[in-house]
Image (tube, grey):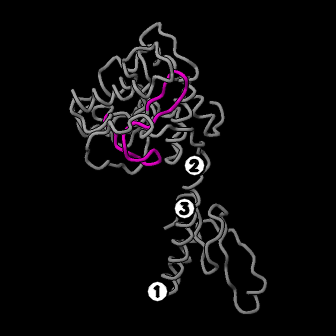
Amino acid sequence: MVPPGGTAHVAGGPGPPDSGTMRVLRGPREARQRRAVRIPGAAPALLGCLPGLAAVAALALCASGVERAAETHARPAADRYHAPRPPIVPRSAWLGDAAREQPPPRYDDEVLAVFVHHTDTPNGYECAEVPAILRGVYSGQTGARDWDDIGYNFVVDRCGTIYEGRAGGVTRPVTGAHTQGFNHRTTGIAALGTFTAGVPVPDALTDALAALAAWKLGPAGTDPRAKVPLVSSNGLSRYAAGATATLPAVAGHDEGYPTSCPGAALTARLPDVRDLAARLQGRTPG
């Protein structure tokens, strides 16, 4: 199959996918004097004139070229826009022996979007106190709520420190329990504190949110400023189960579920988070 605007390369193997030329063999003497002849629309006609086996071989060469061209064309976005992994405190450093028994982690195929939350806990903490606060969040979610683990994939404190949340490995697309209907193919990042209207949002916190979002969205080639299609898995979200919603790649919790989370103050900073995450991926301003 020849892609629209592409070219079939016959008998000479795959050539440049957008060259618009076809190599024609003219016989033993002329084979040494091959030249590229531009013949608009000639590829289908020539293939139709070839005998059966020759046509099959030519089509195979063409298909091979198209596959290689597609692979070459598909890789750059994800490869080019990788962001470096920020420092992350492992869950063993804050959870220790307080971990409950739990089932094995679940995984998705990739991370297309990030949902930002706040933990709705007090803001006036010292950063050295964060491990104890996280144990309290974990205990509340696995105890009173009877969840199998903390719901957030990551937690960021006001000093800009990133903590591993849900078990399964920070480099993997772990299925979280953070946004009703949209836990699949997303990562949940919680800002430690309460960020309702008028509450100051530390730059260190938003910088860490951006660094984490840029890194997690990089493998899928997602621009943090873009919108992405996500399928709702639960009718308790803002969308019916099975419906496809087009949501920001860096979204607030309230984009997918009717809630005031992540708070008006943090929501107002999300455009800055998206722009910084895009720059960290090496994207041009836009």
Where is mark 2, residue-wise? 77
Give the foreground label among 1 and 2: 2
Q: Nearer the viewer, residue 148 or 229?
A: 148
Pointer 1 or 3: first along the chain: 1
Q: Residues within 10 Å of mark 2 (few under 14, many from 20)?
A: some
Task: Say which residue label 1 marks.
Answer: 52
Q: Nearer the viewer, residue 283 or 201?
A: 201
User: Mark 2 is on which residue type?
Assistant: Ala
The CA distance from mark 1 to mark 3 is 28 Å
Amino acid type assigned to the residue bearing label 3 in the image: Glu
- Residue stretch in magenta: 155-177
Q: Which residue is mark 3?
A: 71
Residue 223 x/y as whole percent? 54, 38
256 to 283, vertically: above or below: above
In three-dimensional space, the C-alpha distance between marks 1 and 2, rounded to whole angstroms, equals 39 Å
Secondary element under disc 1, as helix, strand or loop, is helix
Q: Nearer the viewer, residue 203 or 261?
A: 203
Q: Residue furthest right?
A: 33
Q: Decide: few, some or many residues near mark 3? Use Cα within 10 Å; few <14, some 14-19, many ≥20.
A: few
Q: CA distance from mark 2 to mark 3?
A: 11 Å
